[in-house]
Image (cartoon, helix red, strand yellow):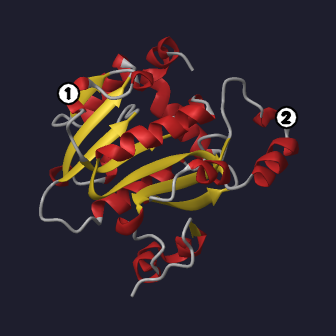
Amino acid sequence: MSNKCYDDLAKDYDAMINKDVENYQFPYSEHYLVHDIIAEYISERNNDNRVKVLDIGIGTASLYEKIIPEKLDLVGIDNCEAMLEIAKLRCPEARLINFNIKKGLPEELKNERFDFIVISYVFMHFDFEFILYFIDLFRKHLAPFGKLLIGDVMFYSQENKEKFLKSDDKYEIPGLNYHVYEEILERIDDNYDLSFMEVNVYTGIIIVEKLYESSLQFEDTLVKYKSNTVKWKSSHPGKKSE
């Protein structure tokens, strides 16, 4: 979707999301749940310091209505100035940067590290190779025990994707990319651990962590996710906490 299109959509964007959620429509039906899970994970970070968050494609910053602002040192990047104007109203203390992530990382952030880097409902607008480039670039900007949180249109397997797309022609939307977690996993090196939650058949959350700083595969850590616990699939499922 072009930047001009998002400028035109900005004032109606939240209403469009709400309509999809209320009517359980593809692709945004689980938008609120994805944000709830990400917000909970950020909020539960046990740290006396403010949690430093970088949000790529922050949009209208609706995610941060779910997190106590005093806990955050928030930096948001978006290529749509109209979206950032709305985000500024929601998060007046945030650093908001108008920038195209296809160009990498803004110069002023190249020496910074973050506890969380968040990207939600953005990858569906980019091809597979860009996702691999993005993960490789931005995971280098994680602080110790930092997490890269990705929530998007995402299938667990190619089989799930094919079955879904064959179920109804309306799901074939021009310009939308339908990514598969297993294909990403195959291309990520072994120094990083990926965990995946299948929110529904076409929506998923990936958490990227440094291998020896990972936590989601530990059963005692997963207790906080209650009924969702069994949905997490780690790239190192055999590893258990001591």
Residue 168 at what x, y percent from top left? 85, 40
> CB atoms at circles 1 and 2 under 8 Å apart?
no
Residue at which label 2 appears: 169
Q: Is residue 183 left or right of residue 87?
A: right
Mark 2 surroundings: few (<14), some (14-19) or many (≥20) residues within 10 A: few
Residue 2 at what x, y percent from top left? 53, 16
Location of the C terminus by quadrant is bottom left
* Extreme-top residue of the structure: 4
Mark 1 to mark 2 CA distance (whole Å): 44 Å
Location of the N terminus by quadrant is top right
Number of the label disc, if any, that sits on residue 108: 1
- At 48% across and 11% down in the image, what residue appears? 4
Under circle 1, the secondary element is: helix
Residue 115 at what x, y percent from top left? 27, 53
Q: Quadrant of residue 19?
A: top right
Question: Disc 1 marks which amino acid?
Answer: Glu
* Extreme-front residue of the structure: 190
Q: Quadrant of residue 20?
A: top right
Mark 1 surroundings: few (<14), some (14-19) or many (≥20) residues within 10 A: few
Q: Is residue 230 left or right of residue 214?
A: right
- At 80% across and 33% down in the image, what residue appears? 170
Question: Disc 2 marks which amino acid?
Answer: Asp
**196 over 179 or under it: above or below:** below
Could you say which is closer to the camera, residue 13 or residue 221?
221
